[in-house]
Image (tube, grey):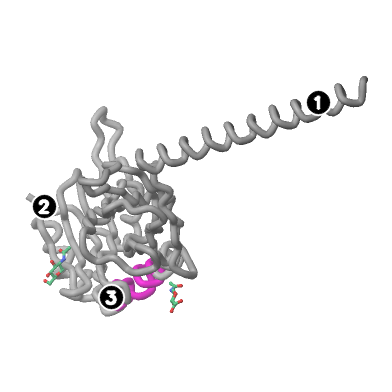
Amino acid sequence: MSLPGLLSFHHVLMLSVLTGAADGYYNYRWTQCIYSSPDLSDMVFIEGFYFNKYPLVKFNSTVGKFVGFTEFGVRNCRVLWNKDPNILQQEKAQVDVFCRHNAEITEAAVYNKTVQPKVKLSSVTPGDKTHPALVMCSVYDFYPESIKVSWLQDGVVVTSDVTNTEELPNGNWLYQIHSELEYTPKLGQKISCVVEHASFSKPMIYDWDPPVPEFEFNIQLLFTIETAGLVLGILIAAAGFIYYKMKSAGL
Ligand SMILES: *[C@@H]1O[C@H](CO)[C@@H](O)[C@H](O)[C@H]1NC(C)=O
Ligand SMILES: *[C@@H]1O[C@H](CO)[C@@H](O)[C@H](O)[C@H]1NC(C)=O
């Protein structure tokens, strides 16, 4: 069996259908830039040459040379690509000129980009004289992931009775987090949720406006009834006084 001719390094760039048969054959080159470090120091350039999905030859920048996977691929590497210093040098340079260059552009478009969260405070348990109240601070749709959510009670940071969830990915680059505070409701107390995030230039404070506790509501209602009674009394007295005046003036 005679092997097909050697591949030309430059002319396998394009996916090309080699025959007119119904299924066809395809021949493609797949390049990858793989890294995880933000400074791109662990960048690896991988280039694979495939025929009908099977790899013929791969280049891995960490290995620094071509590796063949089929008899044809091995022969290509041995007699041609690994023997040509120009091809090897060009291929090794890809980790910088192709991978790092493009990664820097992509990173600049993503890094330092922030999305401000939407913050919502809600009552989980209203609480009363015997049971503590539970309030939740929900922080939605922020980017990046790193965030700090804390609580202030009358201006003092509360560390106990706080439960935080993890930062939960929404699956669309944005995250959410929820924090609960257990507290004993008192008249006139001030509770706030504090959110610190890269999208804010300073910590943002969200005040909790609790549902009015029952006893406080009763006091307010009582006060309202008393006030209404007083106003009514004054009106009646004034009307009576005017009536008396009019009568005594003989009108
Ligand atoms: C590239 O080569 C290195 C060193 O052999 C290896 O650890 C790594 O897994 C290879 N990467 C890929 C994607 O094959
Ligand atoms: C992001 O911001 C930091 C500090 O402001 C800066 O040092 C860094 O170069 C920026 N990164 C990008 C990719 O713009």
In the image, is 180 to the left or to the right of 206?
left
Spatial CA span between label 3 and label 2: 31 Å
Of the pair 179 and 125, the residue shown nearer to us: 125
- Please name the residue that numbered disc 2 is placed on: 2
Tell me the quarter of the picture where residue 142 sits: bottom left
Residue 190 placement (x, y as % from top left): 40, 58
For image coordinates 81% across by 28% down, the residue present is: 242
Of the pair 83 and 248, the residue shown nearer to us: 248
Residue 124 placement (x, y as % from top left): 28, 42
In the image, is 216 to the left or to the right of 182?
right
In the image, is 152 to the left or to the right of 233?
left
Q: Label 1 near label 2: C-beta < 8 Å?
A: no
Residue type marked 3:
Lys
Q: Does the rendering let one see residue 124?
A: no
Q: Label 1 near label 3: C-beta < 8 Å?
A: no
Q: Label 2 near label 3: C-beta < 8 Å?
A: no
- Please name the residue that numbered disc 3 is placed on: 92
Of the pair 195 and 17, the residue shown nearer to us: 195
Residue 93 is one of the magenta-drawn residues: yes
For image coordinates 35% across by 69% down, the residue present is: 156
Of the pair 30 and 26, the residue shown nearer to us: 30
Pick whichever of labels 2 and 1 is earlier in the sequence. Answer: 2
Residue type marked 1:
Tyr
Residue 244 shows which numbered tag? 1
Q: Does the rendering let one see residue 99?
A: yes
Tell me which image quadrant ligand 2 sits in: bottom left
Residue 104 placement (x, y as % from top left): 41, 70
In the image, which residues are magenta?
88-103
- Prevailing secondary structure class for the magenta stretch in the rendered image: helix
Q: Secondary structure at mark 3?
A: helix
Residue 17 shows which numbered tag? none
Give the vertical position of 139 relative to 225 (above or below). Answer: below
